[in-house]
Image (cartoon, grey):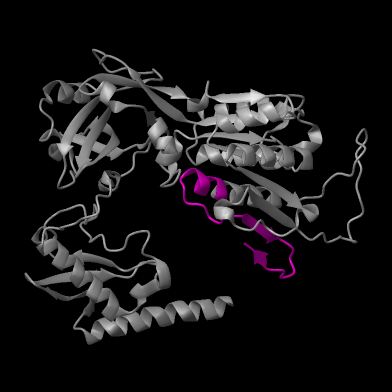
Amino acid sequence: MTSVSFDEYVASARQHFEEGLIRTGFRELEAGWEGPVPHSAGTTRVVIGLPSRFPFRPPTVTPVGHDAVPWSWHRDLDGGLCLVAEDDHDGLWWTEAPAFLEHVTAWFEHADNGWQDDRPDLDLDRYFQPSADRRLYLYDDLALYLNRFVRFSPSGNKTMRIRYGTRPRKAFEGGRDRFGYVAHLGKVDVPPRTWADISARIDSTADLDRGIRQQSIAIVVLIYQRDTHDGAIVLDVAPAKEGGTVVTRLRSAADTEAARSSRAGVRAPELRESAVAVVGAGALGSFIADMLVRSGVRHLTLIDDDVVMPGNLVRHLVGPDAIGLPKAEAVKQHLIRHHKALAGIIGTSNHALTSGADAADLLRNHDLVVNATADFATTALLHVSALSLGTRVLSAALQNDGRTYRIDVLPPLDAAAPLPPSTTTADTQAPPLFEAGCGSPISPTPPHAVIEAAAATVRHAIGLLVDRPLHPSGETRHLHPTPQGSQQ
């Protein structure tokens, strides 16, 4: 799209939308397009504004009389209607005025009915202007600090971390710490927007107000509840010149295990007690281990008899600081460094899996064993051991210089047929590459193939762990740029 055609598209979309407003009785004023929106409780006049990024951003809608419409979680700080959720941006549907006005009418209908079956978004932050202090304020379990004075101390990367503290008797000038107080707002049906709204909900604010006036209290942390969901906000507070309290919003976040695992996926709670062993902590195995942990697995065993070489790093999870470490230990240290909750519950073995007794113990003591060695002898050993115990392993490997990955459920579920043998395709354009001190060619498998194969393996592993297998036999997929399809 050229710049001219882009500008023409934007102008055409704006004109088309405005013409639709005119046909429904709206007229253009200095503030925007004003007109009526009928709904079950009556008719409300609103002003519709087109932002500079329209049509890529939806129009804004503000009631002509701000207080004529009840304040709720579905209104913005400026009084506008909160109409379009971030997950409702498909197709630029709002560019058609009739469809957009139907959406506005539906908003008023929901408001008339008291927002029944409302989605409890915890978005109190958007009801306060951002503070000039752009540091990130981190807190842990706020229940430990409830109705207590706290302090926030500087930490790395422009962060401030909560600590226990007492309110200083006077303004604490020149110090690096900032002092505050943690209070509970209770269940919040209508979001507060001013200090008066906040103080009306706190049991006792006399000492807090005094601290703010004396500038010895600069931060107020509020815990609140919407329906059954808990939220928190960290506010910057200061006395106003004309009296009262100026309140702005600090950038804040919970630094808790729950916060760090909340985006792990809907299966994470089921995986928390699963025990998984990864045999082979090389490139593929290291990313499999990492993704299993990110997905919720908290009991992991890593097995590998090799050490990290400089040449491994381009495809491996770990970095240069791990060179010379046993691969299993290197992956363990990386996982603990990034997931503190794993300390003490990751086991390692720096020896190869060679005996049937060791394989049987591994299978008995884990809910799933993932074989990422690409070694025929290890794969056969685990397969035979699984058959004898009536269990199974998941075996993953990259083939054809990274153009194919193969994931086998061994033995297949429900007596299904195993995957057919993989075909080998030679790449005549890539001559073999050798590294000094190594007797076999270096695999040219690219990093993206490793990560894609690891992700697919973890999907199959999760399916087996939660008894929802993706396929009884596994998966073979060709990653070659020419269309070779996939087989499952």
| Percent of width and height locating residue 435 | 90, 39
Residue 414, placed above or below residue 183: below
Q: Position of residue 24 (x, y in %)?
A: 21, 84
- Residue 265 shows up from this direction: yes
What is the magenta range? 460-488
Residue 367 relative to residue 54: left or right: right
| Foreground of the two, 273 or 208 | 273
Q: Quadrant of the N terminus?
A: bottom right
* Image point (32%, 26%), residue name: 141
Furthest-bottom residue in this view: 23
What residue sits 89% from the left and 44% below the top? 441
Q: Is residue 475 magenta?
A: yes
252 lies left or right of 347: left
Residue 88: which quarter of the image?
A: bottom left
Q: Is residue 189 left or right of residue 392?
A: left
Q: From what the image shows, is residue 106 above or below residue 87?
A: below
Q: On the rendered image, what quadrant is the C terminus found in?
A: bottom right
Q: Is residue 254 visible?
A: no
**219 in magenta:** no
Residue 305 in which image quadrant:
top right
Count of marks placed on residues = 0
Residue 443 percent coordinates (x, y): 82, 47
In the rendered image, the residue lying farthest to the front is 388
Q: Is residue 67 above or below residue 268?
A: below
**Residue at 29 percent of width and 20 percent of height:** 150
The spot of residue 301 in percent (x, y) is 60, 29
Q: Residue at x 45, y 33 (%)?
A: 273
